[in-house]
Image (cartoon, rainbow, N blue to C red):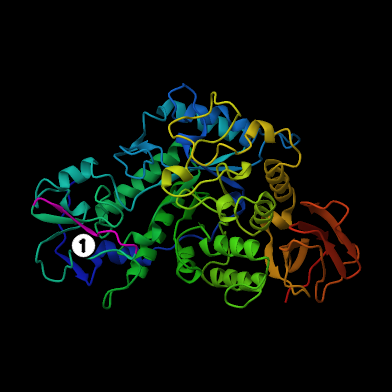
Amino acid sequence: MWIIRSTCLLLVGWLLVGCTADKSAGERAAEVSRQPRRIESKYGVYYQVFVRSFADSDGDGIGDINGLTSKLDYLNDGDPLTDTDLGVTGLWLMPINVSPSYHKYDVVDYYNIDPEYGTMEDFRVFLQEAEQRGIKVLLDLVINHTSSRHPWFKESARSENNPYRDYYVWAKEGQEGFNLRGRSSWGSRLWHRKGSSYYYGIFWDQMPDLNFDNVKVREEIKAIATFWLNKGVHGFRLDAVLHAYGIFEEPLGTNLREKNLQWWREFGAALEAVNPDVYLVGEVWASARVVAPFYSGLDSLFNFDLAEGIIRAVNSGSTVYANGKDFAVWLEGMYKEFAAVEPHFLDAPFLSNHDQERVMNRLRGDIDRAKLAAGIYLTMPGNPFIYYGEEIGMKGTKPDEEIREPFVWFREAKLPETSWQNIAHNKDTVPWEEQQQDRNSILHHYKRLIRLRQTNEALAKGDFVALESSNDKVIVYGRNLRSGGSARSSVIVLHNLSLEPQEIIVQGEDLSGAKIIFESTGTNKNRVNGVRISIAPLTTVVLQRSAIHAP
């Protein structure tokens, strides 16, 4: 593709703003908006898979597409009457495109499967088998940057006059307005020398950032996404959403946030034209205030604030959040902030991911607390995302390779277990095979929660109402599915954060007739007596009732 080079690039301090020669394209992008959201087809419980670590089909030690296909019956066997499968309805596959790295977040070829993982035919079969089981597939789409080995970048680096030069962002030593010594907020270098010039790359010198002010780049990205939608994927997890234009702040009069939002609206609208039910979930690793505006372009955003809030609450044993508010009240306020941008937002609650210390480590290896944390986020609104191995209590701390260790299938290593990485943290993790037979295992707990969610409309699709209680050791909220202004299905969810049994009164609620439909522990110790509820230590209880008053 031939392009016109940009006529200007402005950097104030260490923040980048690009100016394309095609100003009309930028103006058109500002006018793009997505259609009213069709969210009914997008609900589900998703499972994040690092293909390399999940299941190996050929004995080379590296997980692959065929290995994943062989384990689909564990994830969801397609039969709602069985209880041997986990029951998830969606998969997020971490990057599977051609890449020189083990993690594959530096893509060389967006249109092919990395040979370590398999072939396009393997992927076709995988999609077909997933579809038969009712499993939707999201691909990790890494488009903030490419690999430095990508043909675009190789061409871009050849000369200032190369037609691909403007696919990336370049500057010269001493060029006015550029701080080539600038660093990101986490300390990484922003500019990297190549010959007599510098290119911009926020994460690493092997990951040069694309120039989204270039309309040709934007069209390339939309073409890549369209290619995979036409192959049969249902949507994308979008990496580094915040960084398409600059980082974090707005340099003198240029609204970088708005440029980011415009791009994601443009991207979402383009993909809706291909598949009106496309599902887009973005990574904006920031506070809810920063996250909220991105709902104008994306269906879901990972809720990092909620993940941290859940872990704090479970570790502290108190519903009082850091800002002094009750946990449920704080969360209700966050949801209102999201709804102000997009009334049909789908939150993406989770506990940890491939970039973070595993939740089992955050909870000091306490299985009961891990079950409680799962009970909280798997009863929240939106689409929960489970990081592979979380459901069997896998552990892991930095460096990154050790939070991405092989899934523990058996006590003795054998296929499909992978061996690309030595086990540092999970030698004592009870393997999947043994947990399958244990009704008290954390795996069985996850299965029960997922089935409850999938069979209860209020939990799967209902709104969220913070409820007042008489006890700061118990989180209490309602989930209501409404029809014609009234609740069609309603539940009350309670989580006892303490090590002692608790008795609470839910203010303003008549619990007569309420029925316990789920209790994580303490069977026969959790009771409803009029307006009072008794709940066992570190326990989640779900009550079904006909209606809940919403303020």
Which residue is the site of mark 1? 20
Prevailing secondary structure class for the magenta stretch in the rendered image:
loop
Q: Is residue 191 magenta?
A: yes
Q: Is residue 137 magenta?
A: no
Residue toward you, 387 or 435: 435
Number of residue marks? 1
- Which quadrant of the figure contains the N terminus? top left
Q: Secondary structure at mark 1?
A: loop
**Could you tell whether 56 is left or right of 253 in the image?**
right
Name the residue located 39 percent from the left edge and 45 percent from the top edge: 225
Asked which quadrant contains residue 7, the reply is bottom left
Q: Is residue 481 visible?
A: no
Residue 364 location (% of width, % of height)? 59, 54
Residue toward you, 437 or 120: 437
Q: Which residues are magenta?
A: 186-195
Name the residue located 39 percent from the left edge and 41 percent from the top edge: 103
User: What is the three-letter code of the residue carrying label 1?
Assistant: Thr
Residue 370 location (% of width, % of height)? 65, 52
**Could you tell whether 351 is left or right of 371 in the image?**
left
